[in-house]
Amino acid sequence: MAALDSSTDVVIIGGGIIGCATAYHLARRGVAVTLVEKGPIGYEQSTRNWGWVHQQVRYPHLIPLAVESVRMWDSLAGDLEADVGWIQGGNLTLGFAAADLAEFERWGETARRAGLETTVLARNQVVDMLPGMAGMQGSWTGALHLPTDGQADPDLVTAAFARAAERHGAHILNDCAATAVDTTGGAVSGVLTERGPIRASQVIVAAGAWSGRLARPLGVRFPQRSVRSTVVRTEPVDPVTAVTGWGDGFTFRQDRAGRFVLAGGEAAIYDVDLGLFRDMRWFLPLAWRNRRWLRMRVGRSLLGDVAASLPGLSARREFWERRRKIDPPADAKGARQTLARFHQAFPGLAGAGMESAWAGNIDSTPDQAPVLGPAASGPTGLFLATGFSGHGFALGPAAARLVADLVLGDEPPVDPHPFRHARFAERDVPVVVVHRR
């Protein structure tokens, strides 16, 4: 077990892709940085996502950050001196009606103004692009094509950032939960951990779905909820395509081992907890407008929250220890449906059975955009890097660079204004509606 630093320049709370990448960007510029993670590095959503590196984002202000991130992905293996599984095969999002193609054209105009190459393809052009997926079936009429999108291996990327950060002098402490951010005289003074305090004048909260719980005692609030999404991996088949795709109720990519990684598109489960009542005014409009995709369940999450809120109970005293390794259950029915849709669309791949299925918790904000930069309230020296709403893996390299630049007072690669914490107090938060099938 690594020794605990008594002091450092910056403490990062959270060992996912954002935390580890931010540690890398700071350490390579000579900043003394310590990262603490309650469990293993990259155990939660950073290794449970689809593996997509996509630029077709829901929120237009995210496009420049997505474009910058893909530019960084292209050289990431060399920068980190590690294999990250990067394949730039492009992405296709199928359309099923004239309205879908018209929406693709509108979005494409916005994307092209931001420097992103995108085209709308007719049905025959899509078939020509996927020759290995013979017998494609479905009522789709065309697709949006982003040729510079790609994919990478979630099991490799966060670990590669962590190792690179350590080579540049960062201290990374896994299985070491942060219990609170400490303050003195209205400024950050360090982080309290289960292994003792670490003194620092700057703290970055990059704890994914747990960020709000760490920030609230400091008077720092922002709406953030978590939804559970299931991913399926098939048995390996011969190489078919490097394209990632969004079909009729499912998504797909084929990894280098020949296995297809599938998900149910926007389908997700919200496990009701106490936070829903706190953030209800923010998320109910989003949930209602996207009700076709979201199922709500009441059960263990709510009971666990209630127990953790009652003084004297062990569930409250041992909150982080009880959540050291989050392994949410996969939606078995949803996994079967996703695989069936894939087989129906590509009957030539019907022999690819299910090898495994898993789930992950996606932390979301009402406008589906992250919170990046200094906290607008609370102590000085506190920074937030959270709320990526399913885009954290793709945006990780550039978002982490942006946060590191803001911590150091340097010019960031893209305008950070759309991601400011203050936008919630300013009510500058559009409700995003899902349009995909």
Image (tube, rainbow, N blue to C red):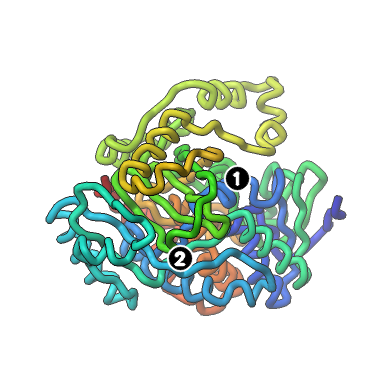
Residue under the image location 28 percent in, 35 percent down:
291
Q: Total of numbered circles in the picture? A: 2
Residue 134: x percent and y percent?
33, 55
Closer-to-camera residue (32/260): 260
403 lies above or below 412: above
Residue 34: x percent and y percent?
74, 60
Residue 286 in the figure: left or right of residue 373: left
Residue 249: x percent and y percent?
32, 43
Residue under the image location 71 percent in, 71 percent down:
27
Mark with earlier residue (2, 1): 1
Location of mark 2 (residue):
150
- What residue type is disc 1 on? Glu
Q: Element under label 2?
A: strand
Residue 122: x percent and y percent?
19, 64
Location of mark 1 (residue):
44
Residue 90 in the figure: left or right of residue 234: left
In the picture as drawn, the residue positioned furthest to the left comes out as 98
Could you say which quadrant of the image residue 309 lies in?
Answer: top right
Residue 278 is marked as none
- Quadrant position of the C terminus in the picture: top left
Residue 95 visible? The answer is yes
- What residue type is disc 2 on? Gly
Closer-to-camera residue (112/311): 112
